Image (cartoon, rainbow, N blue to C red):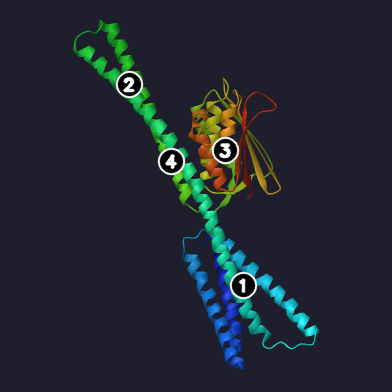
Amino acid sequence: MDPRRLVGALVISLTGVGLAAIAVRGFATGTTGVVDAVVTGVTLLFGVAFTVTGPLAYRTDVESGHLLRIAGWNVLGVVATSAVLVLVYSFQVDAGASVAEPLVSGAIIVGVSAFAHVLIGFNDVRRIRARRLVKQQQKAAVMNRFVRHDLRHAAQLLIGYGEQLSADAGSDAGGTGNGGDGADGERESAHDLGRRIAEIGSDLGDTQSKIRVFDDVLERDDERTAVDVPEVLEDGRDGWAEEHPDGTLETDFDGECSVSASDHVDTALAELIDNAFEHGGDPPAVTVRGERTDGTVRIDVLDNGDGFPDDEMALINEDRTETQLQHSSGLGLWLAKWVIEHYDGSLSLGRRGDADGGVVTVRLPAA
């Protein structure tokens, strides 16, 4: 159960309960005329409508954060209107005027204001979702270009390797081999081709995994928990040591560095470290630093390579359009960026100031 969703629904329903209670009290004490009865009845309708809207909104597909936002607009309408009414009634009382049924007359005004503010909230959420949809379409276009490029490149390699294997097999069948040494050379060539084909398959599988994470990030409004960044890195240390036996990974965290996210932040950090190893020096040396300040955790991933090209930094840092993908080093950085942004964070590229190499700076809300 998402507490944000529950709070949002309760706020809306409690507004209705309050309005309904005032209306019921008005009917119980007796109405003085048709107008009074109509006003009290409309107030009761508003109360019932708000009370029912809370549970209905809880069951809709509106994201928890958006539902809480709508509830916030509702509270704004209630508080602002109530404050104005209190001032108006106080002024009338000080002036010696009498106010008939101030509670009921004020309740219907508050109900109308709350209803209007809820509509504003829904419209606000609609605009946010529209902007997000545009952003998602841009991300999907970037993903599509990467996948098409990877598939086209893999297909070209597989065709070339297949033709070479076919030619080697034909030469062997036609008896045009060069004896033992030639046969050994041919077997070695076939072994190398098989290894390369297996690597292509592994790369395609990795691309598929990234697509799955991308789809999950776009579609899922997951519940966020405290993710301990140093613990995530320690869990993956053995895997990186196996993949990069000559490389080194050092971590330096200043205090508590838990972020408000979910399991996909592990994928984002892994992509950044993999990228640092891949583009690091010989041997690669990767350093991860972290610190917490003012509710934000900053994570720096540093390598000892040649640094990021200017075009790459312009792309990732959003200083240039995402369509210029020929300068991008791969899908991993983009995936990490999208995951970090999904958790209300930011990712930027830069150059190290203390040595040669690049640095990826991530900022995430602290848990």
**Residue under the point 41% across and 31% down:** 150
Q: CA distance from mark 3 to mark 1?
A: 51 Å
Q: Residue furthest left?
A: 174
| Secondary structure found at label 1 | helix
Are discs 2 and 4 less than 8 Å apart at CB?
A: no
Query: Quick one: label 4, few (<14), some, or many (20+) residues within 10 Å?
Result: some
Name the front one of labels 3 and 1.
Answer: 1
Query: Residue at label 2?
Result: 160
Amino acid at pointer 2: Gly
Q: Earlier in the sequence, mark 2 or mark 4?
A: 2
**For marks 3 and 2 on the same chain, the one whose residue lies earlier in the sequence:** 2
Secondary-structure class at tag 2? helix
Q: Tag 1 or tag 3, which sits nearer the N-term?
A: 1
Q: In the picture shown, does residue 348 fall above or below 168?
A: below
Q: What is the three-letter code of the residue carrying label 4? A: Ile
Could you tell me how far apart the alpha carbons at marks 2 and 1 are, in whole angstroms? 70 Å
The numbered dot on residue 211 is 4
> Which disc is residue 192 wearing?
none
Disc nearer the start of the sequence (4/3) = 4
Residue 233's disc number: 3
Which of the two labelled residues, at mark 2 and mark 1, occupies the earlier sequence position? 1
